[in-house]
Amino acid sequence: MKLFYKYLTKRFLYNFFIFLGIISLLIISSQMLNLPSVLYHLNLFRFFQSILLINISFLKLQFLFAYTLSFLFLGYYLRDNKEIYAIYSAGISKNHFLKFIIVLNIFASILAIFISLYIVPKANRERVKFITVNVKKYFLESIQPGNFTTLPGNYTVYIAEKDNEKMKNIVIYNQKNGFLITAKEALFKNTNLILHNGILQVPSKHGFNALSYEKYIFDLNIEYEKNYSIEDFKLENLLSIAVSSNNKEKLKAIAVISERISYVLPFLFIPIAFFFLGLNVSKDRDFILAAALGFLIVYISINYYLVKLIEKGNISPAVYFMLILVLLGLITFWFYKKD
C-alpha cells in the first residue's frame, strides 16, 4: 500500500507544480500591465522583487486552483490510462483513495490557513510599500544639479550641487499652493529629503509667513502612492476592530476575518469532488477541466457575495460557514457516490 500511495503522491506533485507554474505565469503577465511605468526603470533586482511580491499577493488563488485541479487530473490520468481497473482488481477501493486525499487535505488546510491569515496580507502590505518607496526613489534620484526638476504633486525642485545623496542650495516650490522651501544643505535618505538650515515660506492673506528651521523632513507625495485596505490589515488589528463599537468598521473586519478563515474549507472538500469527477465522469479532458474551472469560479463568486452580506450585516458568520459547508459537503458526497 505504501508503494501505491507513493505513486499517487508522485503523480499529484507533478500535476501540482505544473499548474502552479502556469497559473503563476498567467497572473504575473496580467499584472505587469498594471504596474506603474516607473518600475520598469528600476534595476533588475528591484524589478524582480516587485514581480515576486505581486506573485505572492495572488498566492491564495494560485494555491487553491493548483491544488484542486491537480486532483482532478490525477483522477483523469488513472481513468484515461486504464490504471484504475488494475488498481480495483488489486483490491484497492474508493476508501483507500479517500484516505490518501484526506491526509493531503489536512496538510494543505494547515498551509492554506497560514497563507490566508498571514502570508498574503503581509505580501499585499509589502507590495504597496515597495511600489511607493521605489517610485519615490526614482523621482528623487532623478534630480540633477543646475536644473529645475518637476516632480509629482506640482513640485519644482532646484539644487545647485549634488554629490551622491548630499545636496547643497536647494529650492522646492509647490506650484499649486505657493509653498516654498529653501535649504543650504540636504541629505537624500530612504524616500525623503532631510533639509538643513533653511526657510519655509507659507502663503497667507497678507503675503507670506516665513519660518526658519534647522532641520526639516520633506516627504514627497506621489500620485502612485496607495494605502492598503482593511482586507490586508494584520490579524490582531482586525480583531481589535471587530470588538469595537463602530458598527460599519466592525462588520467589515468580521467579514474579512470570516473570509480568511473560510479559505481553508475548499481544501477539505473540493479535492475529493474533483478527484472522483476526473475518475468517474466519462468525458474528455477539456470537458472536465472546463467543468472544474466553472465550478471554482461559481464558488468564488458565491463566497464573495456571502462575505459582502456579512459586511452589510445581512447574515452572521455562523450562517455563512454553514452555507459553505453544506454546499461543498453535498457536492463532494455526490461525486464520491457517483459510479
Image (cartoon, rainbow, N blue to C red):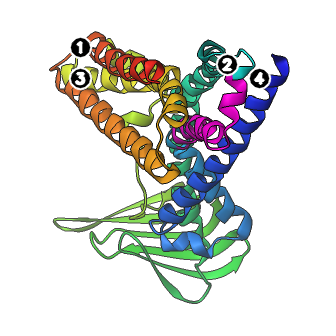
Residue that mark 1 sits on = 316
Dot 3 amino acid type: Ile
Residue 107, quarter of picture: top right
> Disc 3 or 2, which lies upstream in sequence?
2
Judge the density around disc 1: few (<14), some (14-19), many (≥20) Cα neighbours within 10 Å: some
Residue that mark 4 sits on = 5
Name which residue lies at 30% across and 34% down.
304
Judge the density around disc 3: few (<14), some (14-19), many (≥20) Cα neighbours within 10 Å: many
Dot 2 amino acid type: Phe
Whether residue 63 is in magenta: the answer is yes
Where does the image place residue 289, in percent across and percent down from the top left?
47, 47
The residues tagged by marks 1 and 4 sit, at their Cα atoms, a distance apart of: 41 Å
> Disc 4 or 3, which lies upstream in sequence?
4
- Does the image show residue 59? yes
Residue that mark 3 sits on = 310
Which stretch did the figure color magenta? 62-88
Dot 1 amino acid type: Ser
Give the label, 3 or 2, closer to the camera.
Answer: 2
User: Which type of secondary structure does the marked residue at label 3 adopt?
Assistant: helix
The residues tagged by marks 3 and 2 sit, at their Cα atoms, a distance apart of: 35 Å
Cβ–Cβ below 8 Å for labels 4 and 2? yes
